[in-house]
Each structure stands twice: as structure tokens, then as C-alpha cells.
Image (cartoon, rainbow, N blue to C red):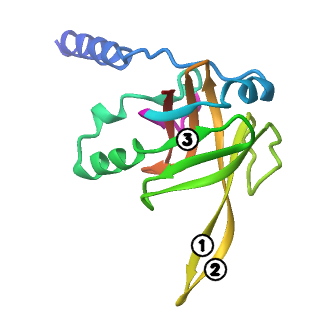
Amino acid sequence: MKYLILVPAVAILIASCNNKEKISAPAAPASVKEVTTVVPGKNYKTIKLGILSPFAMDSANPVNWNIANEDTTKFFRDYAKSQLAFTLTFSKDSACSFYDASQKKTFTAKYSVDDDPKSGNDETKPGIKLRVQYKDSIEFGASKTPAEMTLTYLVRGINNNELLLETGNSFNDRKLVVWMKAE
């Protein structure tokens, strides 16, 4: 009798785990040149948020794009709303600008693209990286000190109108991935 209940329950569990919505994300770039020829002159706006899986078994599909449907807490909704405001605008040369929702401010910057895993602080993850350098000020004590800041994004996917970036931001200790579309 136990098996009559256990077998259908396990079958339903396995079927529900494999029933994740398949999302056709852009493929990872093959070279630095691919990124440097696609992004100039485009204005990208975030359209979707994903969370990177920490498990090796998810290597075929590492990003959970359904997190907005799964986590309905007010905290996550507020976090997602602020992250969806992120934009990146590239000029025809190495200049760019981006909107930082946490500071509610647009920054002008310079960008570069490379595939050097040793460049930057504590970076060991291989792949093509988009580096955005800008000037900001750090408040220390009662004064503000000018500082050169660098944001590094791992380019997880790209095509003519879309860009997938693994950000330095995280939610529940899992990296945030943004899906951006050119306007």
C-alpha cells in the first residue's frame, strides 16, 4: 500500500521539478571583439532579473529567471524594482553612462572589454568582462574623498539587441544577473 502512494508522489515531484519555464537567453560571446562591435551606440535597459545557481548540477541552465514569480516578499519586490532601474548607455567610443538606482544618480564613465581573469580584484571566473570605470566620492568621517571606481560585469550572453550581465550584486548570497534590451 505504501508503494501505491509513494511511487505516484515521487513521479509528480520529479515532473514538477523538470517543468521549469524554458527561456531562450542570448548565447555567451565567443570573443572580446563580438562585444566591442555590438554594444557601441546602444542604450540598454534592464527587462528581467535572474539569480545565479550555486550548484554545479545547474551548469546547463545556471540562471533562474523565474525568481520574480517565486519570491513574492515585499523585500524582494522592492529590491527587484530598484535593480530593474539599471541602464547602460554606450557611445561610439569608450564612453558610457549608467544609472545607479541605489544612489538615484546617473554616472558618466569609460568602459573596456577584456577576457583577462587576473585583471581586477579577486577575479578568478573565466569569461569576457565588461569593466565600467567612473569617478565618485566616498564619504569618510565628515568629508568626501574622490575615488576612481570600477564595476566589473561578466558578459553571460549577447546578441544584436540583448545583453546578459552577471553583476556584483547579490540576493540571498546568490549573484544577480540582469537581462538588458537595447532601446
Q: CA distance from mark 1 to mark 2?
A: 5 Å
Point out the stretch of residues depicted in magenta: 47-56
The residue under label 1 is which amino acid type?
A: Ser
Camera-side residue of 5 and 146 = 146
User: In the picture provided, is 122 more to the left or to the right than 66?
Assistant: right
> Residue 21 colored magenta?
no
The residue under label 3 is which amino acid type?
A: Leu
Badge 1, how many Cα within 10 Å: few under 14, some, many 20+?
Answer: few
Camera-side residue of 91 and 156 = 91
Q: Residue 17 in the image: state x and y as whole percent.
A: 36, 20
Residue hosting label 2 = 145
Where residue 103 sits, quadrant-wise, is: bottom left
Q: CA distance from mark 2 to mark 3?
A: 25 Å
Residue hosting label 1 = 137
Q: CA distance from mark 3 to mark 1?
A: 20 Å
User: In the picture provided, is 101 more to the left or to the right than 142?
Assistant: left
Residue hosting label 3 = 88
SS at mark 2 in the image = strand
Badge 2, how many Cα within 10 Å: few under 14, some, many 20+?
Answer: few
Q: Residue at x 49, y 31 (%)?
A: 179
Q: Residue at x 43, y 59 (%)?
A: 102
State which quarter of the image contains the N terminus.
top left
Q: Residue at x 28, y 31 (%)?
A: 69
The residue under label 2 is which amino acid type?
A: Thr
Q: Residue 144 in the image: state x and y as whole percent.
A: 58, 81
User: In the picture provided, is 161 more to the left or to the right than 72?
Assistant: right
Principal SS element in the magenta part?
strand
